[in-house]
Every structure is written in C-alpha cells, then in structure tokens.
Image (cartoon, rainbow, N blue to C red):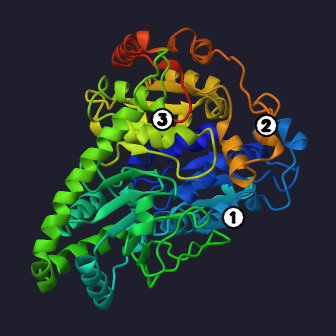
C-alpha cells in the first residue's frame, strides 16, 4: 500500500462514521504507508481507519502450498512490524488467535472512531488468519464508540460570560469543521456574540463560511488579530499562533477546547491558556450557544454588540476588496494562485468539493475559493505530501456513494508541482480512468519546491542560501509535462492543458470543467507567480 492508497482512504472521510479499512501483506507496503497514516493521525476524528496486515508464515512446512510464492523468502519481515507505523496510530495490537478476532477488530474500531480518533493497526501471522473456528456472533451494538465529551456547567458559564463581555473576542480553529454540524454551531455563536471573529489556522476543513462578516480567512499562525484580541477561544487547533512571529497580548484571556487538548503526540505544545477542556467542539459550542442566548449579560451588552456588528461588516468589505486587488493579474498577463482560483470558482458548481494541497499558495487559494458549505474544503491536516491525488479520488468515490451516481459532486484538486510528483500521478490517473472517477486537477507550477526556501529564509534570512538560485539549492523542478503524465497513464483518456497567461486562462479552465462534467478527468498545468 502506497501513499496514494492511504490518501484515497483518507479522502473518503466524507463518510466519517464509516471507517475505511486497509489490508496489506508486504513489509514494503507497510513502510510506504507511513505518510498515509501520519496525515489521518494529525487530523482528529475525521479519519477512523483500521489497518490490518499479515506477518509472513511462521514456518516453512505448510499444509497448503497453494498460498506459497517466491516473494516470501526474498522479502523477510521486520522483527517488530508494528513499530513501522505504531507511533502514528491510536491503537496497535497483534492478533494471536482466531478465536477472538472479532473482539480484536471491534476494539480497534472503538479506538478508531472515538475521540481523539485516527488510524489503528492490527497484524497477525498467516497461520492465525487460516485458523479453523467454530462460528460465533457478537452484538455489535455493544461495541459502540465513546460518546462525545461535554463542558462542565461551570466551564460553560465562565467561557460564555467572558465571550459576551470581551471587547475583541476571537475564535481560532483548525479542524472543528470535521464535524459538519460544528460549522453551523460556530456561525450561531458569531451571530449571537456580535463582534466575535473567526480565524482558521489549520486549513484542513471548512470550519467557518467565507460569506460571514466574522470570517478572517486562513492564515498559518500569523495574523494581527492574534495580537489585538482580549479573549481567544482556541477550538480544535494544533498551531493557533507562532510565538516567534506574533503572540497574544499578555492580558488576553485564553480558553482551549479540544478533543486532544494536551496534544499527546506532539513532543512540544504549550499555549498560555487560562483553562483547558477536553471536549467535543460541536457539543461545547451547543452548550455555549444555549447559555449565552439566555444570559442577562447579553442584554446588558446589546448596544456594544450592535456597534461591533457594524464594524465587522465594514472590515469584512475592506478585506474582500483587498483580496480582490491582490488577486489581480500582472500587466504582462501572468497571474498568481489567487486570480486562478477566483476565475475557477466562477466556472465550477457552487457545491464543488476542493481537495487542497497548494502548500505555500494555500492562503491565496482559500481567500479566493471562499468555501461556504461544510465538507467542501478538505486538506490532509498533516505533513505527508502527495496526499491530494489519492485524496481527490477517495473524495469522488465517497461523494458518489453518498449522493448517488446520478448526482455526482464536482471534485477539484489544487496541488503544487512538487507535491503532484510526490502523489504517484501515474497510479492516480490510471485508477481514475479504470474506475471512472473523473476529477479536475490544477497543478500550480511555480517551478520548484518553494516551501524549503521559505523555511530556510525564516531561520537564516541573510544566509548563503538566500543568495543562490533554486537550481543551486536543488529545489528547482524543470519542465515536466504534468498533463502529459496523466494522459499517458490513462491511455489518452485524460484531458490535458497548460496555461501561463490570462489570455487563455478562462478558455482552458472552461474546457477542462466541461471535460470533467462529461466524465473525463482533466489536468491543467497553470504557471503561477508566487505571493499572490
């Protein structure tokens, strides 16, 4: 199993109550699966995924030689195969007897579907898998996942009163939108506490709609609102801010609500919160909404909230204007990711699902796609690059199963040129053709891996690396035919195009959209300018 396969399972998290099971047999496939396991474990609760894998035979005296092949002697197992991906999993175990295999699988599923959820890992030798059993049954209703946790009454009152009385309240979220109901609950909170603003610093889900005046967009840990807020509610977020670039005021009151509030798998994590609560975001938001709507403080602060509501509208309109200005193409006809996404947004259906792996261009994509429907913006939530190819196929498959083959959702993958190559594109587009999963892929060609350069300059802005080219740093990608890779892998089935100026941008994108609507995958290489 490769990163592509794991990403496909991950993409199918559109059906969060349906765990996606992977079965593998080779040590090489297990090692290939590490990035495919890392991303789901970083993105809590959206990715319940059991992995079931086999050991090689325990001995060479087989009672049934039909199952033997020459690969086994040439591909020895590792001493402890669980360690390959164990650190990314919520639970791992070896199935040592077939007599309790149902209990073992159900226990793994409980970990996979209970907060904080994620991948689980089971393995067992072939002799165990072939063991003769007397059939037995379990009552599946007795193996349910753990119910979502709630805030205490005292916590609800404390946070609710603080939100109502704050001058500049701010919610910072990262993946609360994994539960689609949480989006509406957060909107209700913003409508009630007029003046509350919402900043996304995760970008893994559509957590708050872009057409709401409280929307501050997606920023990776750096935004002026973090400095000015006098109350911050951190809600399901791994990196709310980056202390070396900006941090809250020392007088700000901070509350942290998360399914994994201590971040058990992050070696270093600390925010100066007044209080921390391990709770489900939707449940907590519902509690806060119920409390605040009946609070006497809300009435007392009504005039202040009315003024703040008007200020929010003004700042929102200014923000939209600035985004549009920044997305304008250059005088020479070149354009950036912002203009590309703004153009594409007007050509695709309003309920399009976006699989985003734009890396350094992600904020520009978010500003101009402006997702408003829960579940229509999906990112991997982790650092395993190459996710979006298989992820987009998984999203397409899940949406077809949910909405039916007669009402398929339009799926767009936006991917950087470097991450496109990481995604094993030959396999992605062969699978797309083989199983009739048409998607639109936009490859952002900025001629290299820009993320390593940005990381380097953050640490050594005036170092030797700042004075040399991408080629000298070995992060340049010179001229692959990205659409040609897809065409070749699909036997000519995929539509392919390339655009590098505004003169033919809309035309090529329109042709690609029509190709996907007609049942073919389309890949468009877009040469983009950085930083816009």
> Is residue 99 left or right of 345 when viewed as pictured?
right
Between residues 309 and 113, which one lies in front from this camera angle?
Answer: 309
> Is residue 430 left or right of 207 when viewed as pictured?
right
Q: Is residue 42 above or below residue 249?
A: above
Mark 1 element type: helix
Closer to the N terminus: mark 3 or mark 2?
3
Find residue 530 and report its horizontal and vertical position in percent: 56, 32
Between residues 529 and 388, which one lies in front from this camera angle?
Answer: 529
Between residues 107 and 19, which one lies in front from this camera angle?
Answer: 19
Q: Dot 1 corresponds to which residue?
A: 87
Residue drawn at 55 percent across, 54 percent down: 40
The disc placed on residue 229 is none
Residue drawn at 54 percent across, 50 percent down: 21
Residue drawn at 53 percent across, 69 percent down: 107
Q: In which quarter of the image is the N terminus?
A: top right
Q: Can residue 138 be seen in this view?
A: no
> For the residue carrying disc 1, how many other residues have a C-alpha within 10 Å: few (<14), some (14-19), or many (20+)?
some
Q: Is residue 230 above or below residue 194?
A: below
Outermost residue on the bottom side: it is: 154
Residue drawn at 82 percent across, 36 percent down: 69
Task: State yes or no: discs 2 and 1 in contact (Cβ < 8 Å).
Answer: no
Find residue 360 and report its horizontal and vertical position in percent: 57, 41
Find residue 526 and report its horizontal and vertical position in percent: 52, 21
- Give the quarter of the image for residue 88: bottom right
The disc placed on residue 392 is 3
Q: Dot 2 corresponds to which residue?
A: 467
Determine the CA span between mark 3 and mark 2: 38 Å
Q: Can residue 465 be seen in this view?
A: yes
């Amino acid at each position: 199993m490769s990163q592509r396969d794991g990403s496909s399972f991950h993409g199918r998290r559109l059906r969060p109550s349906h765990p996606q099971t992977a079965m593998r047999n080779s040590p090489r496939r297990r090692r290939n699966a590490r990035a495919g396991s890392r991303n789901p474990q970083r993105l809590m609760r959206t990715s319940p995924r059991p992995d079931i894998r086999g050991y090689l035979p325990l001995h060479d005296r087989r009672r049934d030689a039909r199952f033997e092949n020459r690969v086994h002697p040439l591909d020895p197992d590792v001493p402890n195969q669980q360690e390959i991906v164990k650190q990314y999993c919520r639970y791992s175990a070896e199935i040592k007897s077939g007599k309790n295999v149902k209990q073992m699988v159900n226990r793994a599923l409980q970990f996979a579907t209970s907060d904080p959820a994620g991948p689980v890992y089971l393995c067992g030798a072939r002799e165990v898998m072939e063991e003769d059993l007397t059939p037995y049954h379990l009552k599946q209703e007795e193996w349910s996942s753990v119910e979502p946790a709630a805030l205490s009454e005292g916590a609800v009152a404390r946070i609710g009163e603080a939100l109502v009385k704050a001058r500049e309240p701010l919610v910072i979220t990262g993946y609360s939108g994994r539960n689609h109901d949480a989006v509406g609950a957060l909107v209700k909170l913003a409508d009630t506490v007029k003046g509350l603003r919402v900043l996304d610093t995760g970008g893994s889900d559509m957590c708050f709609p872009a057409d709401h005046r409280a929307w501050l967009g997606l920023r990776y840990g750096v935004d002026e609102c973090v400095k000015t807020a006098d109350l911050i509610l951190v809600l399901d977020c791994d990196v709310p801010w980056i202390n070396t670039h900006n941090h809250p005021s020392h007088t700000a009151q901070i509350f942290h609500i998360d399914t994994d509030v201590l971040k058990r798998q992050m070696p270093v994590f600390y925010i100066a919160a007044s209080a921390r609560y391990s709770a489900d975001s939707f449940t907590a938001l519902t509690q806060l909404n119920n409390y605040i709507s009946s609070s006497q403080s809300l009435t007392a602060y009504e005039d202040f909230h009315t003024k703040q509501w008007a200020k929010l509208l003004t700042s929102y309109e200014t923000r939209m204007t600035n985004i549009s200005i920044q997305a304008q193409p250059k005088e020479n006809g070149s354009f950036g990711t912002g203009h590309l996404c703004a153009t594409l947004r007007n050509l695709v259906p309003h309920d399009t699902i976006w699989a985003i792996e734009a890396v350094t261009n992600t904020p520009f994509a978010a500003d101009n796609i402006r997702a408003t429907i829960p579940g229509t913006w999906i990112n991997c939530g982790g650092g395993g690059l190459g996710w979006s190819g298989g992820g987009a196929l998984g999203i397409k498959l899940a949406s077809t199963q949910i909405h039916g083959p007669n009402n398929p959702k339009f799926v767009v993958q936006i991917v950087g040129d470097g991450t496109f190559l990481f995604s094993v594109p030959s396999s992605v587009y062969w699978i797309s053709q083989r199983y009739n999963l048409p998607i639109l892929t936009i490859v952002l060609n900025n001629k290299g891996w820009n993320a390593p350069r940005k990381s380097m300059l953050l640490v050594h802005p005036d170092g030797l690396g700042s004075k040399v080219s991408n080629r000298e740093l070995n992060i340049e990608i010179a001229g692959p035919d990205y659409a040609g890779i897809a065409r070749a892998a699909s036997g000519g089935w995929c539509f392919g195009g390339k655009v590098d100026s505004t003169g033919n941008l809309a035309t090529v994108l329109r042709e690609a959209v029509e190709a996907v609507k007609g049942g073919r995958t389309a890949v468009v290489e877009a040469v983009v300018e950085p930083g816009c």
